[in-house]
Image (cartoon, coloured by chain):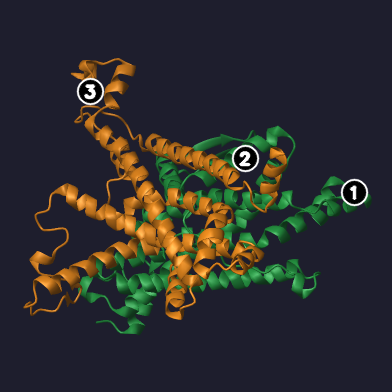
Chain colours: A orange, B green
Amino acid sequence: MFSFCTDPATLPQWQWFACYLTTPTHFAFYRSFLMVMLLLAITAPVALALGLVGAMAVRSRIWPVSWLGKGYVNIVRGVPDIVFFMFVPIALGQGIEWVFHHIQCPDWDQPIRQGNDFIVCREAKVPGVNAPAWVRNAYAFSMAVVAFALVFGAFAANTLYGAMQAVPKAQIETAEAYGMTRAQAFRRIIMPQMWVYAIPGLSNIWQILIKATPLLFLLGLQDAVYWARELGGQKTSLYTYPHPDWRMWYFLALLCFYLFLTWASERGFARLNNRLSRGQATAAGERHRRGAT
Amino acid sequence: MRTCAESFEGYILRALGRDYGERLLPRNLDITLCDQLFLIASGLIWNIYFAALAIFVGFFLAVAVAVAKFSENRLFSVPASAFVFVFRGSPLFIQFFFFYSAFVLLPRSGIDIPLGFVTLTVNTTALTTAQVGGLIVLLLNTTAYSAELFFGALRSIPKGDLEAADAYGMGPLTKFRRVVFPSMLRLAWPSYTNEAIFLTHSTTLVFLSAFPARQQAGEAFYYARYFVDQTFNPFVAYPIVAGYFVLLTLAIIGLYGLVNMRLNRHLPKERRRRIRFRPQYIR
């Protein structure tokens, strides 16, 4: 990286570290932090949308829809998450390959499950047999996003449903007395007001989501945990930058990164909650009102 | 193919190590449904071991940390808050990795702690095993989470109760033993039940993350993953392990429900606080 990095063996202490920390593998390590942020940035809105749909389904008066919603929320919440994280990507991957298999190789005569093997024809492999590495990574990553979104969508649905129920009933009755339909009352009264009741629960889910991101490692992605193990492991003098077992320090850095994320988001949510309390029929809203007059 | 009785005999204690049952785990085409059922069940030994010990010891530590955090003396409250912040703010997964790699760096021969009259040699190699090292991480983690719950309960003890205790002339220790501690437990118990459930589910992370499973002696989820790797079929092993965990969860709810009844025995039935199961597992 730096011009003085030509021969690491002769470098003084701080320059050695400056060179060591800017090697290409270290940049892969730094990029993996961005991957965590990217995962959070994609998963959070998807999970929230899924949660909103789920909560509306639970509230629905059409019973198949409400059963579907309740089933989704309760099944996902009732099973340990880690099982789900491992299960969804494999099951989904096999499902996709199964569908492709039936579309592209209709004249295939062997069974797909042969004993312990799951066999589909060559054209149906996802990602393709000759796919470049980045496609494989992107595929694994999107599987992870789906698994995360499914699990956290169920949590969010539960929270949002509770928040919708918490909006004062009298207000909805008033809205309906004004002649609003059920949908209008939902859009104009419940939707804008439920957030203040939902924020504590959602912030909790967000914190759990942050702390779930290292599980990417289990899905075989080259995330921060992977790189911390790789880079921190002992390097003998065969390597350009030999060092003893430094995994502890790498994991300490990861620990600090997560501590910072949770701390920052806690503060962010406190501000958001304060903002949303304005004009609400709650103690915090009352405090705002008194401050205004 | 093995019969069910054979696989019960061979695998039900296999989680304890190679000397207890079959030396090798079943491989690819040789796997029967009974193998999966019993091997995963034998893994539960470790789940229960980790959860029971961590929760039991963690309870007393958590009470101490909560009291320290609630203390008006900053000498106690600041370290206690920092401890809770660190262990609640970071993923348990990373904590396992961090502590494992820290334990590995300790000297092999053990650490001498001079106590004046006798020198204690702490065996550090045990720390790199899941049964000791993993347990310590789980213990610290549950201490932090429970301490936060107890801290919240301490803050919401009714003022009248404390004033009544003062009016009776109770000293600080008597007051804590007779008023503060029972009230705190009563208030925190429903969420503490959930904490116990989360911790039990978190025991699945011990072998998944850093700590190696010596002689393939792992917990339930370790075996479930082993079977999925072998058969490439997630539709059998994962539902089995999920089912076992549902049973464990029900057992915990039952046990904690009994304690809850005892804690609230003076209240009329309709005013007793119910335990509600609110699962959110990852920490």
Residue named by callout 3: A1
Q: Amino acid at mark 2?
A: Ser
Q: SS class of the residue under badge 2? A: helix
- For the residues beneath circles 3 and 1, the answer to whether they share a chain is no
Residue B110: percent from left, percent from top: 47, 39
- B84 shown above or below B226: above
Residue A158: percent from left, percent from top: 51, 64
Q: In percent of the image, x 33 and y 81: which residue is there?
A: B6
Residue A100 visible to an observer of this rendering: yes
Q: Amino acid at mark 1?
A: Asp
* Residue A33 lies in quadrant: top left
- Earlier sequence position, callout 1 versus callout 2: 2
Residue named by callout 2: B81
CA distance separating discs 2 and 3:
41 Å
Toward the left, the furthest residue is: A107
Residue named by callout 1: B166
Relative to A10, is B71 on the left or the right?
A: right
